[in-house]
Amino acid sequence: MVPEYKKIRLKFSKLGALKFISHLDLDRTMKSAITRSGVKIEYTHGYNPRPHLVFSLPAALGIGSVCEFLDIKAADISPDDVKDKLNDALPPDLRIIEAYEPESDFRQIATSAYIITAISPDIGDGTPDQIKEMFKKPVVIEKRTKKTESGTMPFDISPYVVVKYCEFDKVKLTLGVNAAASNSVYINPEYIVKAICSELSIDMTDPNTSLYTVLRTEVFFENGQLFR
């Protein structure tokens, strides 16, 4: 008897050292964890069957995230049991937060929310207001592309970035932004950091005095509702 597979969406976090692994390595890690967990999932068809995994657009390399998504098709198991079994097989920095039967498509993702934190001697009390004013006008960066010989092209990111809040407390800047994250327009949050450093003459290159982190916290539909 052919088992009946049902789609299960896994919302997972990728933190710590694992935010530096490539998407290919993430794919291998998930496949290995599924095999160890004993969860029975659907395989691709053909001469070389492989576990059928479908990821949402992943956070860029080096970006921590608490809202990555993976769709699988599993047989004879509840979403909660999938979550528990996979967490037993995954490393601590890679955890399944939620498992459920989805009603949406990854192509419906429109924006991502990020928290950017930064420490630098060049950041002060006036920096939050400077950042807010900065994104009220064009912010042109060199965006990677395959369409030019140089591999980059000028691109104005300001229409695709919304500054939700920006605060400075003693030594640390905390910036909350929403940025386009669809298949047609994806704004890497690293572009936002580099633009701020360039526009405001902030040096983030000295490891003895400066650092910054980026965390993806949520993704949204085009209407602003949380993606599920």
Image (cartoon, rainbow, N blue to C red):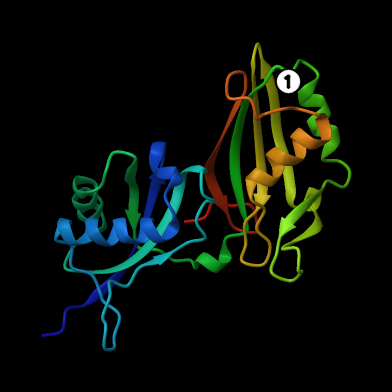
Q: In this view, does 179 lie above or below 207?
A: below
Which residue sits furthest front?
149
Q: Is mark 1 on a helix, strand or loop?
A: loop
Residue 168 location, quadrant: top right
Q: What residue type is labelled 1?
A: Ile
Q: In this view, does 8 lie above or below 191?
A: below
From the top left corner, tell me how far across and down residue 88 is, in percent. Answer: 19, 46
Which residue sits furthest left?
1
Tell me the residue at 50%/56% (across/down): 58
Q: In which quarter of the image is the N terminus?
A: bottom left
Q: In this view, does 94 lie above or below 78?
A: above
**Position of 140 compared to 69: left or right?**
right
Tell me the residue at 76%/41% (across/down): 195
Residue for badge 1: 123
Total number of numbered labels?
A: 1
**Position of 190 compared to 140: left or right?**
left
Which residue sits furthest right?
137
**Position of 76 compared to 27: left or right?**
left
Tell me the residue at 84%/36% (across/down): 134
Which residue sits furthest bottom?
46
Tell me the residue at 81%/25% (across/down): 129
Question: Could you classify mark 1 by the number of other residues whose Cα lies within 10 Å: few (under 14), some (14-19), or many (20 or more)?
Answer: many
Residue 183 or residue 31, whichever sits in front:
31
From the top left corner, tell me how far across and down residue 122 is, in percent. Answer: 74, 20
From the top left corner, tell me how far across and down residue 154 is, in percent. Answer: 82, 57
From the top left corner, tell me how far across and down residue 183 is, in percent. Answer: 61, 66
Q: In this view, does 18 lie above or below 207?
A: below
